[in-house]
Image (cartoon, helix red, strand yellow):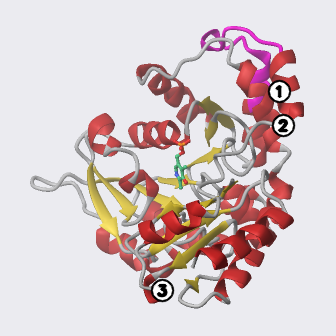
Amino acid sequence: MIDLRSDTVTKPSEEMRAAAAEAEVGDDVYGEDPTVNELESAAAEIVGMEAALYVPTGTMGNQIAARVHTDRGEEILVERESHIYKWELGGLAQHSALQVRTLDGGDRGIPTPEQVRDGYVEADAHRPGTGLLSLENTHNSKGGVAIAPEKIDAAAEAAHDLGIPVHLDGARVGNAAVALDVSPARIVENVDSVMFCLSKGLGAPVGSMLAGDEEFIAHARRVRKLLGGGMRQVGIVGGPGLLALENVSRLADDHENARLLAERLADVDGLSVQPPETNIVLVNTEHAGLTAEEFLELCADEDVIGSAFGTHVVRFCTHWNVDREDIKTAAERIRNAL
Ligand SMILES: *Cc1c(COP(=O)(O)O)cnc(C)c1O
């Protein structure tokens, strides 16, 4: 089986398993887990922020950020296809009592400064006021597009001029950095907080990082506890997380594999393929006369699996447990499936 459903399906390496077994641990709720403390400092340094917090999932990291940055009843500006809005169970309403206002970020999922200004509402006797702008990079639903730092800067500057903070859902910010050949720190230079996942292309079994300034992280630590995310000897999974941080540069292999898969699939009659910028390949099946689900069933019969991303859109995701040969085989099997 070649599993291209997600970059979360990776199994930890022997090295990661050894790091888990050997990790020095303590009670992290008391701030006494040396492995987690090291992980949090290393993560903060990678994104050039004052502090970071280890959280069980990217979803929790995003939801904590929304909660910390806003007051109950405010509005949050999000891109209409963003993960924080579409795929987190309406958590913005449930955990933070926010009203969501969506912006259409177009093909690349990045709102313009004008859209930010138009979406902003000032608090008055009738209107709740805008509390936060949330951006996403790479943008998952748009096919893993890598948003240039200048675009993030422009949207963030518009928000800051209006007095509102900016969060970046950077679940795959490492992929964006590698694709654009800039540092993760440069991408988040002008936002107030960032979440990124250790459990996606970086290969850790568990965990995401939330980073920001000291005051933000101190508050985030309290909200993590509130949500039930205060963990104890969690260096056991933090150890592999530290190794994951060293994996950022190897994301280039995933990107190359995604390009190879896209090239091969573009030659298959009936499929149209969005040229990938990172590790996500979106394939449209409409001209093959198949829905995404029907196409995926045919692929599964040939031992290749992917995810349905729309009625006629399938997502294939490359990751460190599939190599170049696997990709060639997958492309051949998909051709046979059709
Ligand atoms: C996966 C993902 C998340 C959430 O991460 P989990 O660890 O699965 O909760 C958030 N944002 C984006 C863009 C993602 O792809």
Residue at 57 percent of width and 30 percent of height: 56
Q: Nearer the viewer, mark 3 or mark 2?
A: 3
Observer-nearest residue: 129 or 263? 263
User: Is ligand 1 within 8 Å of the beta carbon of the residue shown at mark 1?
Assistant: no
Q: Would you say residue 103 is visible in this rendering?
A: yes
Q: Mark 2 near mark 1, Cβ–Cβ under 8 Å?
A: yes
Label annotation for residue 17:
1
Q: Residues within 10 Å of mark 2 (few under 14, many from 20)?
A: some
Residue at 73 percent of width and 27 percent of height: 238
Label annotation for residue 226:
none
| Residue 293, percent from left and from top | 43, 66
Q: Residue 261, located in which quarter of the rendered image?
A: bottom right
**194 within the magenta span:** no
Q: Is residue 318 left or right of residue 124?
A: right
* In the rendered image, the vertical position of residue 254 relative to residue 87, given as above or below: below
Label annotation for residue 13:
2
Q: Amino acid at mark 1?
A: Arg
| Residue 295, percent from left and from top | 49, 71
User: Is ligand 1 within 8 Å of the beta carbon of the residue shown at mark 2?
Assistant: no
Q: Amino acid at mark 3?
A: Ala
Q: Is residue 10 left or right of residue 218?
A: right
Q: Nearer the viewer, mark 3 or mark 1?
A: 3
Q: Secondary structure at mark 2?
A: loop
Residue at mark 3:
288
Q: Is residue 130 left or right of residue 59?
A: left
Tell me where the magenta segment starts and ends, as one range. 23-39
Q: Residue 119, located in which quarter of the rendered image?
A: bottom left
Q: Residue 140, located in which quarter of the rendered image?
A: bottom right
Residue at 67 percent of width and 35 percent of height: 51
Q: Residues within 10 Å of mark 3 (few under 14, many from 20)?
A: some
Identity of the residue furthest to the left in this view: 126
